[in-house]
Amino acid sequence: MKILVCISNVPDTTSKITFTNNNASFNENGIQFIINPYDEIALAKAIGLAANGNGKVTVLNVGEVSTEPTIRKALACGADEAVRIDAAPRDAWFVANQIADYVRTNPYDLILTGRESIDYNGAQVQSYVAELLSLPSVAIAKKLDITDNEATIEREIEGGKEVLTVNLPVVVGTAEGVAEPKIPNVRGIMDARKKPLNVIPPIEVTQLSKITSFESPVPRGTVNLIDKEQVNQLVELLHSEAKVI
Amino acid sequence: MSVLVYIENIEGTFKKSGFEAVSYAKTIAGLLGEEVNALSIGAVPPAELEKLAQYGADKVIKIENDQLKQFINQAYAQLIANVAKSTGAKTIILSNTFNGKGLAPRIAVKLDAVLCDGAINIPAIAGDVWTIKKSVFSSKAIATEELKAAVKVIALTPNSVETKEAPVPAQIETFQSELLSNDLATTIQEIVRATDKVSLPDATIVVSAGRGMKGPENWRIIEELADVLGAATACSKPVSDAGWRPHAEHVGQTGLAVSPNLYIAIGISGAIQHLAGVSSSKTIVVINKDPDAPFFKVADYGIVGDAFEIVPKLTEAIKAFKN
Ligand SMILES: Cc1cc2nc3c(=O)[nH]c(=O)nc-3n(C[C@H](O)[C@H](O)[C@H](O)COP(=O)(O)OP(=O)(O)OC[C@H]3O[C@@H](n4cnc5c(N)ncnc54)[C@H](O)[C@@H]3O)c2cc1C
Ligand SMILES: Nc1ncnc2c1ncn2[C@@H]1O[C@H](COP(=O)(O)O)[C@@H](O)[C@H]1O
């Protein structure tokens, strides 16, 4: 089974998010970049599935050369090879077109992404890729099992869950529950250096949208602390001041 | 021309987020001088369909296709795109729900449209170029985005605009559309819904608890508080990791992002990854025994003290208030 795992290079979850260039760009100064946490889940699942059969795991990133440490980390976790499409990931539409174009000439049985990237939180790439390739997809999967040529997927729905089956190939965005992220060991890190990382040029994609500026959310005023003996007062404030009950 | 809004139903009923989407579509249609067509797919009773007219849907279009018993994103996207084409809609609106996320990019591809996922406001319209806001970096920032293609798909974040009644006479039409077998590649095996519980993504009040609760056996008081408030329950990541609560309740950067009107955090420290998923809640109440817990810095109201003592008192006070 050939599995493609799409990984995004994102700011570490503890990062303070600030902007430069007149609030037009994200300030990368001092930011530590990591594999998007959901993509780590996809990667762990792919490695597990490949270990059971004679599978092969390719990780793919659309990014500039600066993302290579993140890609090497994915190789250290146990992916077999990597592909980097050499372009700044302008937006989800751009990224998805690069991935779809690559898959058209390099077919896979299973294409995994994370449920969303924690920087732009679109949860778009997976469904774009699926639609561009006319493949079935699940945007947010909580469980994934493969038997022969069939995937059984549990996905979250409003107020519950749904279990579905679908023949491969399929595109799946993974969430918590699909697998436990893997931490690379020393051996993995050594091996990663020797694994192939192919760099390929991007295709051209028409730009349909553009982020023109960022702002920070309006900070809340200082907290109104209520005496623990006066919970009635809280209820009163929630009613008359906050108007939420 | 018209604005097309797709309204998702859950077993034949619409949810608040659906009515928000209709109100949103109505406002945008007003700016454009267009009408609103609301599309419903699946078996929904006429009385429920008529509710869409209450919020200003000039026409309700329904599709009841025998091939389609359940939600399949490929098939639904095809139907929505077919309706958009046949009604000449250049603006397609839907809710950014679990299903909506799987649909919106597909519809955009089919219509050569630009997509704004997770929109939080009414766009500013200047000809074909629209300017709109969405939340990014796990609610740590808001981006202003320009949408440039002639056709736009907007997935609206639930609970970010108000529902507005704007009644028009109900006019219901049926739309016939065939599906190709390729669109029906997935088979739904099972659907499990906890019907007695308020669903978390849709909840206007969320009662959430963390490791401060010490163990799963102590969740009774959390559930009782949620019950009196008609709230959904949620938890921090370590709580679901430990199996005290189901994963579906985990909120935060790596869990569900929620933005209810009221978020009550009990025994949760307020780590940055937790806040990422809840900080866009309208009002935040924190109950924590540690006065230095970081959560107090982003709270509107707080009580410093022992949850085991305060939560039952709060439940009683709300009960008394409601009577
Ligand atoms: C990559 C990554 C992603 C993460 N994603 C998430 C995420 O999505 N969501 C998430 O929640 N976390 C996430 N975390 C974990 C996060 O960093 C925190 O560890 C976690 O949120 C802490 O959970 P907690 O507040 O329940 O527990 P703790 O930090 O242990 O806090 C417990 C709190 O309870 C209080 N307390 C104790 N006893 C009582 C009592 N009797 N009454 C009142 N208060 C009491 C304490 O004062 C303390 O503030 C992530 C971490 C990483 C590294
Ligand atoms: N630059 C990228 N390169 C490869 N995969 C990506 C990239 N950006 C996003 N993805 C994948 O698409 C998923 C969803 O991303 P998004 O649509 O940005 O929320 C992520 O979890 C990744 O698996």
Image (cartoon, coloured by chain):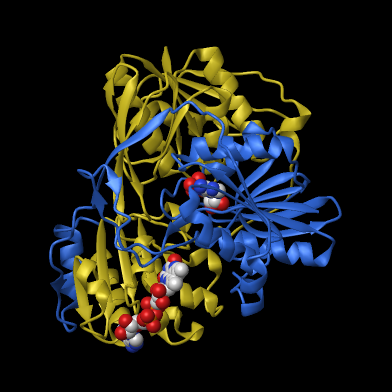
Chain colours: A blue, B yellow
What residue is shown at x 54% (from left), y 68% (from top)? B247
What residue is shown at x 78% (from left), y 67% (from top)? A51
> Is residue A90 rendered to the left or right of residue A190?
left
Taking the image as drawn, is residue A245 in sight?
no
Residue at the extreme front: A194
Q: Quadrant of the N terminus of chain B?
A: top left
Residue A86 x, y percent position in the rendering: 53, 43
Q: Quadrant of the C terminus of chain B?
A: bottom left
Residue at the extreme right: A148
Near-viewer residue (A48 or A34)? A34
Near-viewer residue (B100 or B11)? B100
B230 lies above or below B161: below
A181 lies above or below A213: below
Instruction: Give the quarter the ligand 1 occupies.
Output: bottom left
Looking at the rendered structure, the number of numbered marks drawn on it comes to: 0
Residue A20 x, y percent position in the rendering: 23, 49
Residue A48 x, y percent position in the rendering: 73, 66
Residue A219 image-quadrant placement: bottom left
A151 lies above or below B312: above
Taking the image as drawn, is residue B148 in sight?
yes
Residue B30 image-quadrant placement: top left
Near-viewer residue (B127 or A46)? A46
Residue B133 x, y percent position in the rendering: 30, 39
